[in-house]
Image (cartoon, rainbow, N blue to C red):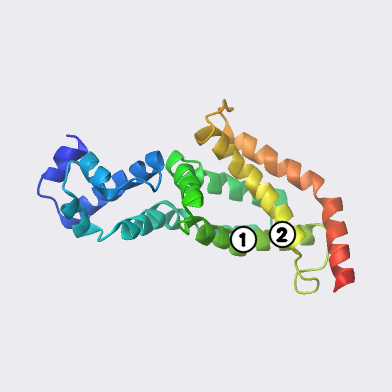
Amino acid sequence: MDKTATLRKRLPRDERERLILEEAIRFFAEVGFEGQTRALAQRLGVTQPLLYRYFPDKDTLIERVYEEVYLKRWNPEWEQLLKDRARPLEDRLSAFYRDYCAAIFRPEWVRIFMFAGLKREGINSRFLETVQNHLLVPLCAELRHSHGLPGLDEVPLSDMELNMAWAMHGAVFHIAMRKWIYDLPMPDNLEEMTLLTVRCYLSGCGETLRSLVGKQRAAA
């Protein structure tokens, strides 16, 4: 039975809401946030007033899509994994990106994120603030520690140093963009490609990091 026929049946409220939300995720991933709720209702085979019984307006629906696609896939244990100095840093980063990419390397995640950035829906800024505060700042601290450099409490983190971490993180995300935005030919093993990206960054960042921290220490 297709989703339209299913929605026309008498269903428990939470089940019907779940079906609407799942289709909304697919809808916005395909057409972006320019897509209208009227078109979504037609696609579901229901009336727009019925849709509004579950989601009073489009902003409410977008917020639920954000919660479902981004917040529910966030693992709070990632930060602790990055800080676990009982393991080598490359081992920690490899384990983190293996799990992180399993959560985000999905067409709906990537496409909704790009559409949200173009429409400035706030999804990107909220998610990227979380990435920066809970992943990249701790990563910068661990990179310093692995190279025997002063901690962030001794020498404050500079914008340039933070942007180095963003460059590596962005390189990983660009793998997903190449596949689901640009539709370019990609290796079958995206995990291996991700881990090679991380390894290249770690092998080349030491000298630059020492220089940046040295300049920041002198300025402080």
Q: Left or right: 3 with respect to 59?
A: left
**Relative to 43, does residue 165 appear above or below in the rendering?**
below
Q: Identify which amino acid the numbered label 1 is placed on.
A: Gln
Residue at 80% x, 49% y: name it. Answer: 205
What percent of the width, then of the height, locates residue 204? 81, 45
Earlier residue among tags 1 and 2: 1
Q: Quadrant of the C terminus?
A: bottom right
Do the numbered discs 1 and 2 sit on residues whose CB atoms are within 8 Å?
Answer: yes
Crowdedness of circle 2 by 10 Å Cα count: few (<14), some, many (20+)?
some
The kind of secondary structure element at disc 2 is helix
What percent of the width, then of the height, locates residue 57? 28, 59
Q: Identify which amino acid the numbered label 2 is placed on.
A: Leu
Q: Is residue 83 visible?
A: yes
The quadrant where residue 187 appears: top right
Checking the image for residue 162, the label placed there is 2
Task: Looking at this view, name the residue that lies furthest to the top.
Answer: 185
Q: CA distance from mark 1 to mark 2?
A: 9 Å
Q: Quadrant of the N terminus?
A: top left
**Relative to 185, does residue 124 appear above or below in the rendering?**
below
Q: Is residue 80 visible?
A: no
The kind of secondary structure element at disc 1 is helix
Identify the residue under disc 1.
132
Checking the image for residue 122, the label placed there is none
Residue at 88% x, 58% y: name it. Answer: 211
